[in-house]
Image (spheres, rainbow, N blue to C red):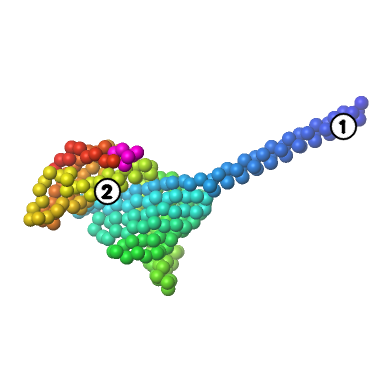
Amino acid sequence: MKKNIIVFFVLICIVIGIVLVSLFWTKEDEIKNVDEIAEKEVLSLCYYYSNKTNSGFYDKAWLNLDIKGKEISGEFNNYPAEKDSKVGKFEGTVGPLDQKIMARTANLWWDSLAEGMNTKEELVVQFGDGNAVALFGEMIDKGDGVYVYKDKMKLTSGFQLGQISCKDLNEILAVEKYIRENIKTITTDKPVLGGLWYVVSVFINYSLNTGSVTYEDGHIQGDATFEYEFDSNTKSTFIKNFKRI
């Protein structure tokens, strides 16, 4: 009888051991599957910056990130109000979350366009939940026309871009483009001395579907506010209540 109890106990232990090992392997497979899915899926993040300067114009910038595993690509466009713009697409690699700064760091190669010249240059971007920032420093030509940071230990943070849904960013860009391309027909003002209206500055408040614009013809300047409707499916924009101020 005692022998049978011992045998039964041993069998129970074996069964429990098999079940535990099976559960462990299943969990390992689940973790691997999640990692594999994460490596295949693309995570898109967008960030936007707009700041009205003392001159009344706006410093603007926007950043789009497409992350797939450790690979990253996207676009960074910087439009200072009173300096030349610098825009372009990039690609590179991204590291894990740094617990100290609660952000990830992307090491990028940026194909930038500034003052009519295309340049391939190094760019470091730190981003997290809520904001992103590009790091700037002295650049040097490494001998083949590609520019790199002279000392990556001396990089400084630029302005912070706030996180925004990519849908809202696309709306801002689409409406702003429409205003710039159609200001000549949107305003009822008549240009003088044979001039043509063009946009100097435009601001879009996507949460209220309103905006403001400054335009001129080379001789006189106009300021106006407006409301708009935007269809994200057709990418069409309708301007209403355009009022000169």
Looking at the picture, tell me which residue is in the foreground, 179 or 126. Answer: 179
Query: What kind of element bears circle 1?
Result: helix
Distance from the alpha carbon under mark 2 to that under mark 1: 81 Å
Could you classify mark 1 by the number of other residues whose Cα lies within 10 Å: few (under 14), some (14-19), or many (20 or more)? few
What's the amino acid at mark 1?
A: Val
Q: Position of residue 214 (x, y in %)?
A: 18, 49
Q: Which residues are magenta?
A: 230-235
Q: Position of residue 34 (x, y in %)?
A: 58, 43
Considering every residue shown, the one lying at the far top of the view is 1
Looking at the picture, tell me which residue is in the foreground, 232 or 126. Answer: 232
Dot 2 or dot 1: first in sequence order is 1
Q: Residue 140 got which mark?
A: none
Q: Residue 7 got which mark?
A: 1
Frontmost of labels 2 and 1 is 2
Could you classify mark 2 by the number of other residues whose Cα lies within 10 Å: few (under 14), some (14-19), or many (20 or more)? few
**Is residue 168 placed above or below 200 in the rendered structure?**
above
Looking at the picture, tell me which residue is in the foreground, 229 or 245. Answer: 229
| One can see residue 20 in this view | yes
Q: Main secondary structure of the magenta part?
A: loop
Considering every residue shown, the one lying at the far bottom of the view is 143
Which quadrant would the N terminus be assigned to in this image? top right
Q: Residue at x 47, y 53 (%)?
A: 72
What's the amino acid at mark 2?
A: Lys
| In magenta segment, residue 234 | yes
Which quadrant would the C terminus be assigned to in this image? top left
| In magenta segment, residue 158 | no
Looking at the picture, tell me which residue is in the foreground, 29 or 151. Answer: 29
What residue does disc 2 label?
177
Q: Is residue 212 left or right of residue 188?
A: right
